[in-house]
Image: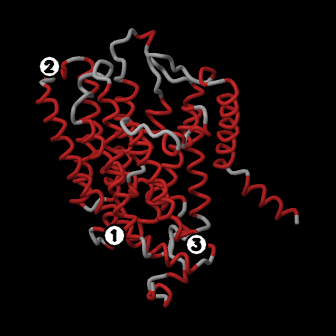
């Protein structure tokens, strides 16, 4: 009896659980402070910097890295690449949690959760770009939830409603791609209203195009990155199909990402040429811009290409992680670092520790929920009643 108790205690008191517990407890305290003492008590935002880390990281990065949902679904169901089928559910789950956490982060930034649905259901500002972004995110989050439900229905044993939702797969996928095209690009268009605040190297009439194209290779990289972590820490919850198809998924997405990133680099060069900003590349800001473009786009694109040519999964996985960092850097450059670049250093926005702590809390919450779902529902494995060889699956 004592041994069992000791084993149970050891199971609960793991380093992961302890660290996560501390982060969640700290996040709960920060949440109470935010909603009882106001936004000024936990952030360094002001009239010059109304959008900070919670928008730049939690929203812009969150939406871009959640693009793996529409990319993987489109590859599998629209383009007929069935070899990516095992990656669809993990990608959909990651995207659904990503968008859900974006909405959660917006509650912190807006400060009045009960008013969040107001622009869509009560007073629609249809002339506002933010209205289009909000409406698309709302609709796409709904689409992702419906796409996720078959796994939950299989877990709950609800076969009839699961069969009904599965029949909607193609329609939901097409709808999801259309919505993603709209709001991914519109997030970039938001910053076109601030030409005097955003540094010219990052400000461009192509911003909507940049955001959409970068979301494509961001989604592919996130699928590879998430799969790498899942195979390392959740391997025992995977079936043979996931283990067998994972290398092909990684190499396939790596090849596509390398091509898309090459196109992205070409469009970035065209943008600089059209705006005639070559001389700015010789400045301090220009050096930082080149760090982003060469170090976090050109380099991982080359690494992807080498990994595919040599069939080297290690190269591909490192390139995916590096690309994810590059997307984070790009979105933070546009929304925080190169924004209000002309202000003196003492007036520049620097996120407070409490802002950073809140973002870490939100990301950790997503990891905990992802782990909870994947260890219980058929996300990383097929449910035996719905496997490819089961009579039930053949009927559906």
Q: Position of residue 256 (x, y in %)?
A: 25, 57
Q: Quadrant of the C terminus?
A: bottom left
Q: Is residue 325 above or below residue 341?
A: below
C-alpha span from label 2 to label 3: 58 Å
The single residue placed furthest to the bottom in the displayed view is 391
As helix, strand or loop, the secondary structure at mark 3 comes to helix
User: Mark 1 — residue?
Assistant: 77
**Which tag, 1 or 3, sits closer to the chain's start?**
1
The single residue placed furthest to the right in the displayed view is 1
**Which tag, 2 or 3, sits closer to the chain's start?**
3
Q: Is residue 299 above or below residue 257?
A: above
User: At 60% from the left edge and 54% from the top edge, which residue is drawn?
Assistant: 369
Q: Residue 153, which numbered label? A: 3
Q: Residue 250, which numbered label? A: none
User: At 53% from the left edge and 37% from the top edge, which residue is drawn?
Assistant: 106
Task: Mark 2 vs mark 1: give the one in front.
Answer: 1
Dots 2 and 1: beta carbons under 8 Å? Answer: no
As helix, strand or loop, the secondary structure at mark 2 comes to helix
User: Mark 2 — residue?
Assistant: 279
Tell me: 137 left or right of 15: left
Q: Quadrant of the N terminus?
A: bottom right
**Which tag, 2 or 1, sits closer to the chain's start?**
1
Depth order, front residue of 18/277: 277
Dots 1 and 3: beta carbons under 8 Å? Answer: no
């Amino acid at each position: 009896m004592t041994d069992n108790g000791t084993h149970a205690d050891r199971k609960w008191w793991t380093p992961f659980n302890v660290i996560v517990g501390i982060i969640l407890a700290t996040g709960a305290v920060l949440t109470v402070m935010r909603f009882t003492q106001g936004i000024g008590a936990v952030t360094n935002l002001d009239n010059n910097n109304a959008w900070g880390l919670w928008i730049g990281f939690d929203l812009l990065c969150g939406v871009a890295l959640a693009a793996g949902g529409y990319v993987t679904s489109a590859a599998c169901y629209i383009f007929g690449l069935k070899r990516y089928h095992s990656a669809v559910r993990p990608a959909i789950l990651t995207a659904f949690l990503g968008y859900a956490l974006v909405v959660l982060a917006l509650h912190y930034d807006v400060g009045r959760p009960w008013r969040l649905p107001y622009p869509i259901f009560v007073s629609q500002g249809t002339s506002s770009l933010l209205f289009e972004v909000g409406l698309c995110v709302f609709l796409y989050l709904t689409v992702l939830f419906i796409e996720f439900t078959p796994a939950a229905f299989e877990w709950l044993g609800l076969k009839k409603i699961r069969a009904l939702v599965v029949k909607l797969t193609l329609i939901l996928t097409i709808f999801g791609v259309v919505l993603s095209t709209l709001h991914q690009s519109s997030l970039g268009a938001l910053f076109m209203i601030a030409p005097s605040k955003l540094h010219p190297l990052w400000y461009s009439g192509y911003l909507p195009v940049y955001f959409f194209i970068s979301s494509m290779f961001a989604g592919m990289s996130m699928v590879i990155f998430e799969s790498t972590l899942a195979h390392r820490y959740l391997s025992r919850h995977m079936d043979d199909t996931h283990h067998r198809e994972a290398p092909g998924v990684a190499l396939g997405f790596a090849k596509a990402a390398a091509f898309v990133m090459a196109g992205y680099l070409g469009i970035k060069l065209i943008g600089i040429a059209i705006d005639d900003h070559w001389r700015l590349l010789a400045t301090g800001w220009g050096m930082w811009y080149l760090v982003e473009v060469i170090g976090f786009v050109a380099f991982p694109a080359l690494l992807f290409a080498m990994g595919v040519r040599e069939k080297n999964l290690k190269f591909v996985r490192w390139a995916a992680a590096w690309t994810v960092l590059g997307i984070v850097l790009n979105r933070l450059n546009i929304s925080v670092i190169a924004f209000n670049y002309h202000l003196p250093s003492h007036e520049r926005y620097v996120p407070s520790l409490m802002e950073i702590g809140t973002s870490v809390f939100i990301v950790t919450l997503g990891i905990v929920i992802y782990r909870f779902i994947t260890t219980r529902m058929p996300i990383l494995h097929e449910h035996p009643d719905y496997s490819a060889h089961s009579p039930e699956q053949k009927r559906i």
